[in-house]
Amino acid sequence: MEPQSPLLRDLAAAVRHRIPDALGTFWRHAATKGTPLVEPDPEGDPAWRLVTFLWRDEPDRPASDVLALLHTVTDKDRHAGDLAPHLMGKVEGTDVWAISHRLRADHRASYQFFVARGPREETLRADRKAWLHVLDSAVPDPLSALPELPSRDGRNPSSVMALPDAPVQEWAAARPGTARGARADAVVDGRRVHVHLPAGHRADGGPYPVVVLLDGEMWGPVLDFGTALDNLYADGRVPPAVTLMVDTMGRARRMEDLSCSEGFVDWLADVLLSWAAQAHGATGDPARTVVAGQSAGGLTAAFAAFRRPERFGNALSQSGSFWWPDGTEFDGGSEWLTRQFAVSEKLPVRLRVEVGLQEWMLLPQNRHLRNVLEARGYDVAYGEFNGGHDYACWRGGLAAGLAALLAPR
């Protein structure tokens, strides 16, 4: 292949001219700087970069193809039935597989590689069974410059690309010397809840603000969002709060509960929050209560504020599935909840809504919700980040959103 990257073009020329140790020098540079390679925009626009992902062939197990899986960007082409744009090319005479993307300089995304050793037609299959095999087998970038993003369901972690202008996620990593909170996991009415309590918490020291975080099995045991909470508390950005990370109990139960389920929202309001008040001193004040979620959880967070505003005075929706309840998000969606906000009496709640610019299947519906909320006079903060349907993006927006919603007024 003819590389787009200037560094790879230099490597290809050095190999052709048999410059000693050209390949070793290249890989040492990549290991020192970290990957992907980030170079100036070939069109000269300072707001963009040329980003080149690299994979090194194993000498005893060469790949037949390598797919670069850039979160949401690759998914869009998969849904169109075409994975070919994400096949990496081999630099002639080397063990370097590479693919370049021209990306805006504020882009953040998780990514992995799928290394194929079979026929190309098998690699490029985009049906669900083949795609699940790809996701189960994909691996992180061994030379990534940033810490890996853990995955669930036994899958390998992902690497993270954060270009120079991507929003800083200053609270994500553990800090030496920062007081750590405590976990007090429980089973409430048959459902697992991962509870994070701030350092120095006492049940009789409240009432504490309370955060209900959906998809808690991801935010608690997998992503350890408690670390971000500890940092937010230490920086004085969020008052010490009781955080309830609610397990969704499997895919089928998740789809049932996170589809504007009145029963589930009433359980959160009447059972979970009452338990948290008794066990951990959580407040009953809706103005100091936040419900937050992503995707279907983002839809449900907004629905919780709509259905039970006397318990949930603040909702944080990230990449909310506001197309619901149509059978697929790719046909425009009927946007039931948005229509309810449009025709119902204005409620005393605040909403914070964000969505990724790469989320072609959700961006119009989230913008429509914003327009409706603003037209009805709601206290709504709306934002768009340059990324996809991706925990690598959501963890930063979640921390910033809680800081905004729980900051003293």
Image (cartoon, rainbow, N blue to C red):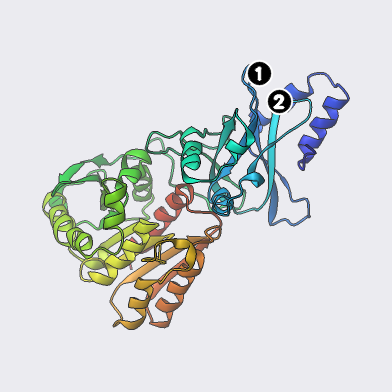
Residue beneath disc 1 = 59
- In the image, taking residue 28 as reference, residue 399 lies left or right, namely left
Compared to 204, does 3 lie above or below?
Answer: above
Q: Nearer the viewer, residue 112 or 234?
A: 112
- In x, y percent, where is residue 103? 66, 52
- In x, y percent, where is residue 192? 21, 44
Compared to 180, does 343 lie above or below?
Answer: below
- Which quarter of the rendered picture does the N terminus lie within? top right
Does residue 408 appear anywhere in the picture? no
- In the image, taking residue 404 as reference, residue 138 lies left or right, namely right
Residue projecting furthest to the top: 60
Among numbered discs 1 and 2, the one appearing first in the sequence = 1
Residue projecting furthest to the right: 17
- In the image, taking residue 259 as reference, residue 169 lies left or right, namely right
- Mark drawn on residue 39: none
Which secondary structure, mark 1?
loop
Compared to 409, does 167 lie above or below?
Answer: above
Amino acid type, mark 1: Pro
Q: Are marks 1 and 2 in contact (CB under 8 Å)?
A: yes
- The residue carrying pointer 2 sits among few (fewer than 14), some (14 to 19) or many (20 or more) residues within 10 Å by Cα, namely some
- In x, y percent, where is residue 210? 24, 57
Residue beneath disc 2 = 95
Amino acid type, mark 2: Asp
Rounded to the nearest angstrom, the CA distance separating label 1 from label 2 is 8 Å
- In x, y percent, where is residue 397? 44, 55
Which secondary structure, mark 2?
loop
Compared to 395, does 379 lie above or below?
Answer: below
User: At x 58% / y 36%, what residue is drawn?
Assistant: 122
- In the image, taking residue 249 as reference, residue 233 lies left or right, namely right
